Image (spheres, rainbow, N blue to C red):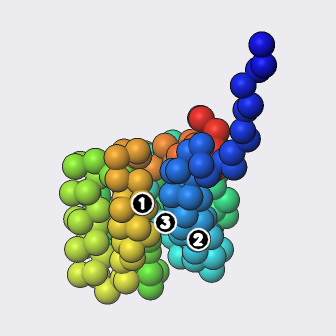
Amino acid sequence: MVAPIRRRYPAHFRNPRIDLYARKMERATRIFQDLQVQSAAGVPIIVEGRRDEAALRKLGMKGAILCLKATGEPRFRFIERLDGSKRAIVLTDFDREGGELGKWLYQELSYRGILADNSSWRKIHSLARTEVRSVEELPSFMRALEIRSRGLRP
């Protein structure tokens, strides 16, 4: 009896989604590199809690990351601390509450003459629409993308 011939196919034939994950990984890397550059230039990043701050530190952010809910102070007093800044990056969670908080922050900062940048939030949200609901999940999302782009399962 002759054993059947086993063909070895390249990885992209075994899993056609590898190219999709590779493109997603490349796009996510560009987004976070841009955030790192802006953060190192002194632009503060506003997040909701301490876990969100820790997640951004894992992703390489070196600059100021301000936690809105962790301080326990009223929102308007938190906004007053930013009056000396010219720009701020708003990076709230991707759920309904985070979206509403992000809109409120954007409007308040704009009203006070601070350029509120929520483009990173929109890019990340469009990239990981169903996979990520909060900022604290971003490091595990990046690891999963890296693993999937190599054709493996996370």
Q: Of 44 and 57, which appears nearest the observer?
A: 57
Query: Which part of the image, by quadrant, shows the N terminus?
Result: top right
Residue positioned 23% across, 81% down in the render: 111
The amino acid beneath tag 1 is: Leu
Which of labels 2 and 3 is toward the front? 2
Could you tell which of marks 3 and 1 lies nearer the N-terminus?
3
Real-space CA distance between mark 3 and mark 1, rounded to the nearest whole angstrom: 20 Å
Does residue 100 appear to the left or right of 5 in the view shown? left
At which x and y percent is residue 9?
Answer: 69, 45
Please tell me whether mark 3 sits on a helix, a strand or a loop. Answer: strand
Does residue 3 appear to the left or right of 58 in the view shown? right
Looking at the image, residue 62 lies above or below residue 59? below
Q: Are marks 2 and 3 in contact (CB under 8 Å)?
A: no
The amino acid beneath tag 3 is: Ile
Could you tell which of marks 1 and 2 lies nearer the N-terminus?
2
**Mark 3 packing: few (<14 Cα in 10 Å), some, or many (20+)?**
many
Q: Which residue is mark 2?
A: 30
Q: Quadrant of residue 2?
A: top right
Looking at the image, residue 137 lies above or below residue 57? above
At which x and y percent is residue 34?
Answer: 58, 74
Q: Which residue is mark 3?
A: 45
At which x and y percent is residue 154?
Answer: 59, 35
Real-space CA distance between mark 1 and mark 2, rounded to the nearest whole angstrom: 12 Å
Q: Quadrant of residue 104?
A: bottom left
Q: Of 52 and 29, which appears nearest the observer?
A: 29
